Image (spheres, coloured by chain):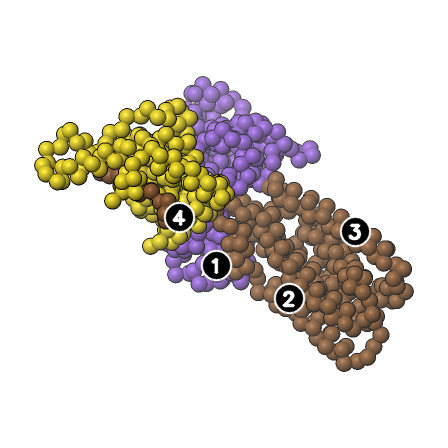
Chain colours: A yellow, B brown, C purple
Amino acid sequence: MDDGQMIEQIRQGRKEYLNTIAEKYYDDIYRFCCYQTGSPDQSYDLAQETFLRFIRYVDHYRHKNLKGYLLAIAMNVCRDYFHCEKKRRTVPWDSPLNPEGESVGGDAASEKVLEAERIEKVREALLCLPPMQREVIVLHCCSGLTYREIGAVTGAGISTVKSRMKQGTEKLKRMLRKEDFYGE
Amino acid sequence: MGNDKIKLPELSVDPIKKKESLYKIQEAAAQKRLVYCPSWLEILKSQLAYISRGYWIGQGAFAGVGILVFLLLGNLSREDVPYLFYASVLAASIGIVTVMELGRSQSCQMGELEESCYFNLGQLWGIKMVLSGSINVAILTGVIGGLSRKTDFGILALCLYILVPFVLSHGCYLLLLFWGRNMGKKWPQITAAVFMGLAAMIPGAFPGVYRQIYLPVWGGVFLIGVVLLALELHSLFKKLSVGGEKICWS
Amino acid sequence: MLELKLDRITKQYKEKIAVDHISVSFVNGVYGLLGENGAGKTTLLRMICNLLPPGEGEIVCSGIPIRNMGREYRRLLGYLPQEFGYYPEFTAWRYLMYLASLKALPKELARERCRELLKLVGLEGEERQKIKTFSGGMVRRLGIAQALLNDPEILILDEPTSGLDPRERIRFRNIISSLGKNRIVILSTHIVADVAYIADEILLMKKGKIIGSGTPEELVKRMNGCVWECLIPGDKVGDYTEKYPVSNLKNVDNQVRLRMLSVDKPCANAVPAEPGLEDVYLYFTEEERGAYEDTADRNL
């Protein structure tokens, strides 16, 4: 069942599809919040809050792009989080892959260590960007939205989105090494 | 787009924390009382299904009469006045179908119940008026188009000659809907339609009124009619918005 | 849980005061509005449904005045007017689907609800019949079904049992009784038996005022010591009915058993009787409350 059909079912009174939508998009929203805020622990709560807000206002939902809509809510939830916490850079990162605790030997271990380092570098670099540029980069590169969709989510015009993308990317290039930037 | 796409590392999600979050979301979903908010188009479509057969027959009859009259007269070479004459009578009486449909709420004692619903009587009547108005305007547009080919009058003049009886008659019909003890009853409405039809014949008896010199008079009467109609509609909907005391009570 | 609060609600028509400064609070449960014809019950219920603006006072639903809630209030409401009609060509199914569309129910849900409710009110199988072929009782049951379509949180029923035969009355009572747990149900009637067994609270209305209220047990307790039964000769009946309010009268052989209200023992062979809600109703609606008023009020 596609998003449109699920929304139609919800409008018809089938509440169980609210859970289906949450299960489908939880990971995407979580990752977005993670990169936006740099705080994996908080991001579970932020993702939860995104879906709670979605449920609260679902009666009036009229959009065509559900993923974009959810990301827009997530974006506002993250902005509210920044506003409350006033934390922009100094959030400790609990990497799920802690190289010091690992006892797996050989190539697998070094792969994981490298990956963990990369995540850390990208995370820090992203947090150094202005929030609007960070939003655009994460929406495009993590959530896979097109520029037009990003424009709809952030409320900015396409040219603004492109310019933020360009400026953000250049800053990241300067901060990161090539292999961190482009991945494998 | 492709060249500057940074590959952001895939982050893993802790399944336990995710499960906890999803559980809270499930609780919120269970408590949510879903409320259906249809769009205006959906409302229009759904109400279309409940308009009475009598209404469609009535509208069809008026449209049919209009076409028939023009076809018949088209075969005879006559002066201008008879076309206008019949068209005026049509314009003056066509509103009766709308008003009888609206009046069903009162005549069938459904008004009080309808008024207590989410889409109350005011909104229901609004939808029916919009629908009906569109159909009537379409029919009259056809009539005016036909007239413009068979007569020498300009389009503006024809619009005025047809819209004046249309607007004035609607003013009368609406009064019957919410004024006096005969609210919503059929026979007063039909009688009114007959009177309106007869009244529309009056200008036909004085061909001089269709001369260009009297156009401002027609324009003035039209404006007054529109203002009166607007005031009536405003008053009607205002009454209905505060409960429709007496209008819809059984 | 909703709370519906009436604060000094008043409605006056020229000389007549239909509703006179009524203040009541409603929460989940079944409320019986008992009163004679002309007591102002319908006017009060119309104001609660926001069909009639009060002349004075305010009706508030969980803190918000209902006149400010507009259609969101009507979404919570289910209403059965005392007199209602139907479009003659409608079948029972079409009637319910029509009202479901006015109550903004999505189509699938509307179909489900219509099926459920037709079964609940015992009209299953009649859905394709034109309503004009229905008996009065069947029309009334259809009316009750439509009031429940949107699963209302506030259910207002104005004389819902009028025209129903005893069996249908019992069925109706069972339906209503089960509904009161999760919503506010206000039903008005002048028939005590309709509310005696199902109401959580009874409001007695007379001449636009609420003259007594309480649970059926509380109200009945107030009548302790005021209700008497005695056997008297047939020719003396007139004397007693003039002097005391009589709630029941039965021919037994060639005498008459009278049940009446009185502070003191009305006659030598009178025995005290267990008061009932009928007696309460009689007491509160009597013109001359007289001497037994003190006893009843003493029992509070």
C87 up-or-down from A63: above or below: below
Please state the chain letter of the residue tagged with numbered disc 3 in the rendered image. B
Circle on res. B58: 2
Report the residue at 54% width, 24% height from top.
C290
Q: Measuring from the top left, give residue C59's x and y in whole percent.
A: 54, 31
User: Is B101 displayed left or right of C6 in the figure?
Assistant: right
- The kind of residue tagged 3 is Leu
Please state the chain letter of the residue tagged with numbered disc 2 in the rendered image. B
- The kind of residue tagged 2 is Gly
Q: Nearer the viewer's eye, disc 2 or disc 1?
A: 2
Please state the chain letter of the residue tagged with numbered disc 4 in the rendered image. B
Residues at discs 2 and 1 both on one chain: no
- The kind of residue tagged 1 is Arg
* Crowd around label 3: few <14 · some 14–19 · many ≥20 (10 Å): some
Circle on res. B1: 4
* Crowd around label 2: few <14 · some 14–19 · many ≥20 (10 Å): some
B127 up-or-down from A127: above or below: below
C176 up-or-down from B107: above or below: above
Q: Measuring from the top left, give residue B132's x and y in whole percent.
A: 63, 59
Given contact means CB atoms under 8 Å apart, are the residues at marks 4 and 1 in contact?
no
Circle on res. B14: none
Q: Nearer the viewer, residue B75 or A133?
A: A133
Between the C-alphas of marks 3 and 2, the distance is: 28 Å
Q: Nearer the viewer's eye, disc 4 or disc 1?
A: 4
Element under disc 2:
helix
Q: Nearer the viewer, residue A20 or C188?
A: A20
Report the residue at 32% width, 24% height from top.
A90
Report the residue at 41% width, 45% height from top.
A68
Q: Nearer the viewer's eye, disc 2 or disc 4?
A: 4
Instruction: Give the labeled residue for mark 3.
Output: B223
